[in-house]
Amino acid sequence: MHNQTTILTRTPDDSQPAPAAGTPERPGGGCPIHTMFRGAGEQPAARRAAILVTGIVAYLMFFGTILYAIGFVANLFVPKGIDSGVPGPIGPSLLINGALLTLFVVQHTVMARPAFKRWFTRFVPEAMERSLFVAAASAILMLLFWQWRPLPQVVWRVDQPVLAWALLGGSMLGWVVVFASSFMINHFDLFGLRQSFNGYWGWETKPVAFKQVGFYRLVRHPLMVGFLLAFWLTPTMTLGHLFFAAMTTGYIFFGTWIEERDLITHLGDAYVDYKRRVRGFVPLPKRAG
């Protein structure tokens, strides 16, 4: 659920001391796993293959997870939806569901930070970092789908057929906005596949330029707007669904606030001006000045 208007990349750390003359550099202090990932001269093929396989697997995990999420939220087409299963006591169910969502929030918040990326890429190739982020997020969502505790108590239900179908259609439109927004920046970069292929072929992965295209001309976080539509528009809102929607909404606002601080640090006045001109979530023009 990470909205990346631009990609923040690690720059080489010139503060690291160079190896002494005549001493071969040993990434990771000789750790064999680290050596394979970072790619000592005798194993370039293994390193490149690891990067490529990780990227493909992570992308397939993401794609399967996002498709399941559509059915999970709408209670359609999947073995276990958000209201599926035998309900338990409200208190323990809320605690379990809250812990699952908090785990996702912590992973997303920590792994998306530039400081973490700089630390993490001391141990894995930069070309693999984004894919590992995507794989970790997907794995946590799989755990959430599996362990989610249903709370089927109805908060509201729309029985009028036209309005009910309109709400369901609005939710599906939200998912369309999510996918469309990701392609308006760089879908395959956002989910790590571009970096993995570049790493396999030995090509440099240049940062995705800061762009104001499509939905990004209307709001700064269209991908997150899509999630909000998908989560809140439903003909039947249960207690469990409401808890899910409220928790994810809180994280969306918190996460975008944190992300924009990083973007201002990285992009400076360009993003400050963008933020001044374009609203975050509501596609209404701002007043001049």
Image (spheres, helix red, strand yellow):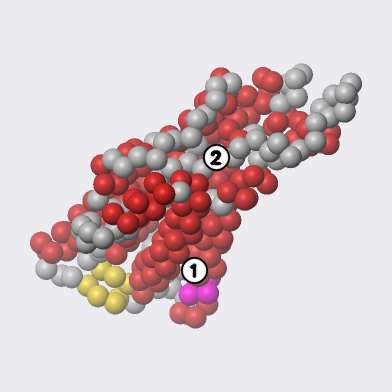
x, y percent for residue 160: 11, 68
Identified at 71% across, 36% down, the residue is 14
Q: Is 80 colored magenta in this rendering?
A: no
Which one is in front, 221 or 37? 221
Identified at 28% across, 40% down, the residue is 213
Label 2 belongs to which residue? 9
Q: Is residue 151 visible?
A: yes
Q: Is residue 144 above or below residue 22?
A: below
Label 1 belongs to which residue? 97
How far separated are the C-alphas under marks 2 and 1?
Answer: 33 Å
Circle 2 residues within 10 Å: few <14, some 14–19, many ≥20: some
x, y percent for residue 284: 20, 59
In terms of sequence position, does the residue under pointer 2 or pointer 1 come before the other?
A: 2
**At label 2, which amino acid type do we have?**
Thr
Helix or strand or loop: what does disc 1 sit on?
A: helix
Which one is in front, 253 or 131? 253
Which one is in front, 13 or 102? 13
Name the front one of labels 2 and 1: 2
131 left or right, relative to 44: left
Magenta segment, principal secondary structure?
A: helix
For the C terminus, the quadrant is bottom left
Q: Which residues are magenta?
A: 93-97
**At label 1, which amino acid type do we have?**
Asn
x, y percent for residue 217: 26, 47
x, y percent for residue 44: 69, 20
| Callouts 2 and 1 close, C-beta under 8 Å | no
